[in-house]
Image: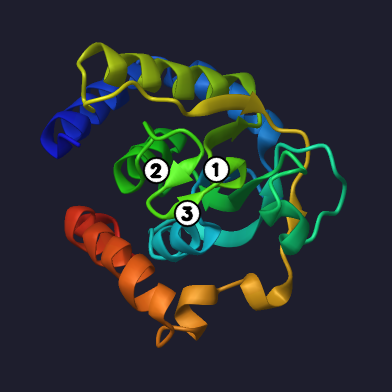
Amino acid sequence: MKMSIILSIFLLCMACHQAQKNDIQTESKKNKSMNNSLEVATLGGGCYWCMEAIFQRLDGVEKIESGFSGGTVPNPTYEEVCTGTTGHAEVIQITFDTTKVSFAEILKIFFTMHDPTTLNRQGNDVGTQYRSAVFYHNEHQQKEAEEIINELNAVKAYDNPIVTQVEKFEAFYKAKSSHQNYYNENKGESYCRFVIQPKVEKFEKVFKDRLKK
């Protein structure tokens, strides 16, 4: 992954999208809840424990939950999703403060912190439940995701084409409580030490200016 190219593309994207700020703010209001500055994003980037640990540390994230989206089985269990027969992806659902972080910045981190070019796989985690996906909540999120993917592909930011799915959000099913806040509560486990911790350290290095205080 060509990190400098990816980060440069996102800076350019954000500059271009700033010109559309008024339209974006109008559209995003349709998806805001709790108060006028909150928005929701639903992302699949492999194991949800990894994505959760990363975005928990991002300034502007008010709430984050691990769960499942994109499938056909209502209220699936983790074990059912792991069979690969439910159609669901492991996802994180983020509630973020748009006065502190934009959806474009969320995507910048998302595409930097996982490999969006491997189909149904992240490292040793293999299966459709580990697919890369953006489940958009409104037209603005859809457009933003599609434009960024097209731009990254156009400059060949990765050695292979991006396979991230951009799908309309339909439902989110929260995973059981023992799967929430997983890294913070299980740092001594081997998966946390050898898989999640390096990702967290990478995030804290690359995005050190965006960390929660």
User: Seen in the image, is 99 located left or right of residue 37?
Assistant: left
Q: Quadrant of residue 191?
A: bottom left
Return the x and y of residue 205 as percentages of the image width and height: 18, 60
Asked if residue 101 is positioned above or below residue 104 in the image, the reply reads below
Residue at the disc numbered 2: 110
> Marks 2 and 1: in contact by CB < 8 Å?
yes
> Marks 3 and 1: in contact by CB < 8 Å?
no
Front residue (pair 85, 38):
85
> Marks 2 and 3: in contact by CB < 8 Å?
no
- Decide if residue 213 is in sight here: no
Q: Secondary structure at mark 3?
A: strand
Return the x and y of residue 137 as percentages of the image width and height: 66, 31
Residue at the disc numbered 1: 43
- Tell me if mark 3 has few (under 14), some (14-19) or many (20+) residues whose alpha carbon lies within 10 angstroms of its own: few
- Tell me if mark 1 has few (under 14), some (14-19) or many (20+) residues whose alpha carbon lies within 10 angstroms of its own: many
Q: Amino acid at mark 2?
A: Phe
Image point 38% across, 21% down: which residue? 149
Q: Quadrant of the C terminus?
A: bottom left
Image point 63% across, 25% down: which residue? 167
Q: Amino acid at mark 1?
A: Leu
Query: In this rendering, which labeled residue sits more in front, label 3 or label 2?
Result: 3
- Give the CA distance from mark 3 to mark 2: 17 Å
Front residue (pair 181, 210):
181
Residue at the disc numbered 3: 125
- Give the CA distance from mark 1 to mark 3: 16 Å
Q: Quadrant of the N terminus?
A: top left
- Decide if residue 202 is in sight here: yes
- Give the CA distance from mark 1 to mark 2: 8 Å
Q: Earlier in the sequence, mark 1 or mark 3?
A: 1
